[in-house]
Image: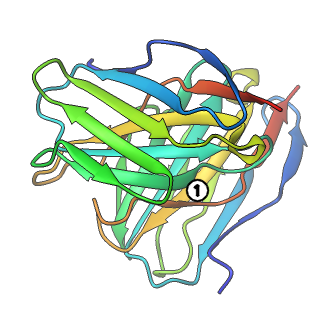
C-alpha cells in the first residue's frame, strides 16, 4: 500500500541554525498531516499539524509547509536548540467515513551540535 | 490530568505466553489506538477504537486482541506471544479524529524470548 516516507534518515545542524526536515507522501487522498517529535525512551509528541486546504502553518519556532503538487511535506525549526535533538516523524491521515488510520513515516533523527 | 497511561513499561515474555498491555486516558477522548514501533519501521497501527464498544483492525492486527468496555480503557491482549512481537507498543488517544493530533503514552517495551 501507499506509505509516507522521508528523504533523509539523519540530519545534523549547528545550534542556532534553522533545520528543515522533509517528508514525501504518496497517498493523494491524504488530507491531514501531523509532525511528531520523539525523544529517546518516550512516546511521540505532537508538534504541529496541517490540513490539505492549507499550504503553510506556523507554530512557535516551527513551520510546516505542504506542497500537494509534488506530495511533499516539510518541517522547519527556527534557531535549533539542543533540546530539539530527537527523531521526527511525519504522519498522514485520510478523512472519510470509516477511515481512522494514521500512517507514519520512518523518521528522521535530528542531532543538534552545540 | 495524567494524559495517556500505559502499564507495564517493560515486560519479558516467553514464547506462547499471553498478557495484556494496559492503556488508560483521563481526557474523555473517544478515539484510542495501539501502535507498535520497530527499528526502521516507524509506527504501525495494530487496532483502534472510535468509542466504547467499537473496535477495528489496523495495519498489523494478527496476534492481538482489543476491547473497549469503557471510554477510559483500551487494553491490548497478546494471545500467544511470539518473538516477532518483540517491539515497543504505544497507545494513543484523540478527542476526535483529525483534531490536534493524537496524545501518546510513554510506551511498553516488550521482549518475547
**Residue linked to disc 1:** B91
What is the x, y in percent for residue A72? 26, 24
Q: Is residue B100 above or below residue A74?
A: below
Q: Which quarter of the figure has residue B95? A: bottom left
Q: Residue at x 26, y 19 (%)?
A: A2
Near-viewer residue (B16 or A59)? A59
Q: Quadrant of residue A110?
A: top right
The answer to whether B58 is drawn above or below residue A98 in the figure is above
Residue A4, quarter of picture: top left
- For residue B50, above or below residue A48: below
Could you say where residue B75 lies in the image, as x and y percent from the top left? 60, 63
Chain of the residue under label 1? B
Residue drawn at 52 percent across, 23 percent down: A106
At 80% from the left and 44% from the top, the residue drawn is A41
Classify B75 as above or below A3: below
Q: Is residue B110 left or right of residue A78?
A: right
Q: Nearer the viewer, residue B86 or A75?
A: A75
Within 10 Å of disc 1 (Cα), the crowding (few <14, some 14-19, many 20+) is: many
Percent of width and height locating residue B23: 64, 66
Say whether residue A22 is left or right of residue B12. Answer: left
Answer left or right for B11 relative to B31. Answer: right
Quadrant where the N terminus of chain A is found in the figure = top left
Q: Position of residue B82 (x, y in %)?
A: 72, 26
Amino acid at each position: 500500500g501507499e506509505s509516507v516516507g522521508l528523504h533523509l534518515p539523519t540530519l545534523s545542524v549547528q545550534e542556532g541554525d534553522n533545520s528543515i526536515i522533509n517528508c514525501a507522501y504518496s497517498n493523494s487522498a491524504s488530507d491531514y498531516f501531523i509532525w511528531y517529535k520523539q525523544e529517546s525512551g518516550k512516546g511521540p509528541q505532537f508538534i504541529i499539524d496541517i490540513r490539505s486546504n492549507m499550504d503553510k502553518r506556523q507554530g512557535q519556532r516551527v513551520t510546516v509547509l505542504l506542497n500537494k503538487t509534488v506530495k511533499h511535506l516539510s518541517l522547519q525549526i527556527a534557531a535549533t536548540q539542543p533540546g530539539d535533538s530527537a527523531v521526527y516523524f511525519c504522519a498522514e491521515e485520510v478523512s472519510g467515513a470509516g477511515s481512522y488510520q494514521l500512517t507514519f513515516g520512518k523518521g528522521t533523527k535530528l542531532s543538534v551540535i552545540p | 490530568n495524567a494524559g495517556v497511561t500505559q502499564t507495564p513499561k517493560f515486560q519479558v515474555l516467553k514464547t506462547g505466553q499471553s498478557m495484556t498491555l494496559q492503556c488508560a486516558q483521563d481526557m474523555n477522548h473517544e478515539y484510542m489506538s495501539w501502535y507498535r514501533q520497530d527499528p526502521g519501521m516507524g509506527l504501525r497501527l495494530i487496532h483502534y477504537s472510535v468509542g466504547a464498544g467499537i473496535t477495528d483492525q489496523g495495519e498489523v492486527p494478527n496476534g492481538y486482541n482489543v476491547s473497549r468496555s469503557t471510554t477510559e480503557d483500551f487494553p491490548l491482549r497478546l494471545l500467544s506471544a511470539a518473538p516477532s512481537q518483540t517491539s515497543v507498543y504505544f497507545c494513543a488517544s484523540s478527542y476526535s479524529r483529525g483534531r490536534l493530533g493524537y496524545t501518546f503514552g510513554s510506551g511498553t517495551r516488550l521482549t518475547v524470548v
